Amino acid sequence: MPTVSARAGAMEPFRVMQVLAEAQDLEAGGADVIHLEVGEPDFPTPEAIVAAGQRALANGITRYTPAHGTAALRQAIAADYRRLHGLEVDPERVVVTAGASAAILLALAAATDAGDGVLLPDPGYACNRQFVTALGARPVLVPVPAASGFQPTAAQIAAAWEPGTRAVMLASPANPTGTLLPVEELVAIAAVARARGGVLIMDEIYGRLVFGRSPDTALRWMPEAVVVNSFSKYCAMTGWRLGWMVVPEHWIEPVRRLAQNLFVAPSTMAQAAALAAFEAGTEDLLQARVRELESRRDFLLSVLPELGLEVRARPEGAFYIYADSRAHGPDSEALCARILREARVALTPGTDFSPGSGRDHIRIAYTQPRERLEEAVARLRRVLAGPA
């Protein structure tokens, strides 16, 4: 039998997908499962976007585009930075990708060589450290406590930076915590990276999903940062697989070559559809959904402490809550398995996001309507009030 590579053998599972598969097995047997595990909005893709995609298909717009995306979409994205942030972004610096995952892979492939170190906050998005490892670089985890909002400080980044460090990758709002990186720390971290000749890769996938404030971007404070974004979360286009990145000018040609070889091109139909995301009517709808998510967050924050699930860092965006689960034992994986089995509520163990704090935490994705969240809380109350 052919042997599997050490890279493949060492790859950790993406636990949330395992939880989803187990929940779907229960549903296939007739169970009513409330899904609070997967980071996927319950909202449908806006009708205007769907209609634009349908028109593209009907008109035969199905052939390859340039590897870095159509000029029309790159110009629309650049115009949005001007509208939202007052920033002039050259559309040539915009690279449209097959989802944000492809953007992250391209950013890391352009930034690192084998053995280079990449600083990552712990907790953080589960796949980032796997991406780094798969490319032959070294993920260097920087533990970030609840006291700092599960976000790193410039002092921590400076202390963790070694001669072999090439990049630091951050997120704001972050997954799994929903917390924001304070502007003063972002500016200071950017200065650390700049002084050491390193690259700041900023995940802004949830950047439009912020509560009680205007969205911001790292490009305002560090124009040479590599910024990753996506249509998946804000526009409810997860299955369309469409993201983008903004790269420094001297990265334009190398990243295009990487994209040509690794991905050929992003989805043609998805790009045509995404142009409708910038229409005024679509924006009004999406902003109403942000307010709905804020209401769901507020509801859960008001009831989770009663369930022995303490939230030690208030989420200010995205649609996640990272809750301390130690009141119910030392093993979040066992707890989530029990909750799924007994309450039919699917949650993600923190071990997906943190080798450090993960066994003490669970992630709750409030991607269900309010009535389903209320039902989930009622089920959790019945299970968590009983013996473990």
Image (cartoon, helix red, strand yellow):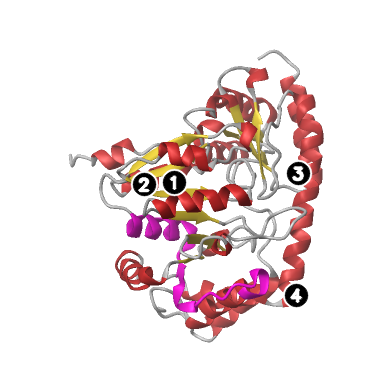
Q: Quadrant of the N terminus?
A: top left
Image side of residue 148 versus residue 142, left or right: right
Helix, strand or loop at mark 3: helix
Tell me which numbered mark, 2 or 4, is placed earlier along the sequence. 2
Q: Which residue in the structure is indicated by mark 3?
A: 297
Q: Which residues are magenta?
A: 82-111
Residue lying farthest to the front in this orientation:
195
- What residue does disc 2 label? 132
Q: In the picture provided, is 147 more to the left or to the right than 155?
A: right
> For mark 1, what is the residue?
128
Mark 3 vs mark 4: which is more N-terminal? 4
Residue 190 visible within the image = yes
User: Mark 1 vs mark 3: which is more N-terminal?
Assistant: 1
Residue at mark 2 to residue at mark 4: CA–CA distance? 39 Å
Q: According to the image, label 4 marks what residue?
A: 281
- The residue under the point 80% across, 32% down is 303
Give how far apart the Cα atoms at labels 3 and 2 are: 32 Å
Query: Residue 215 placed where, x, y %?
Result: 67, 60
Dot 4 or dot 1, earlier in sequence: 1
Residue at image x 49%, y 85%? 60
Mark nearest the camera among 2 and 4 is 2
- Foreground pick, 147 / 303: 147
The residue lying at 54 percent from left, 25 percent from top is 359
Q: Of tags 4 and 1, which is closer to the observer? A: 1
Residue 27 percent location from the top left of the image: 62, 40
Residue type of the residue flagged with mark 4: Gly
* Residues at circles 2 and 1 in contact by the CB criterion of under 8 Å: yes
Picture coordinates of residue 358 (x, y %)?
53, 29
Residue drawn at point x = 76 percent, y = 25 percent: 307
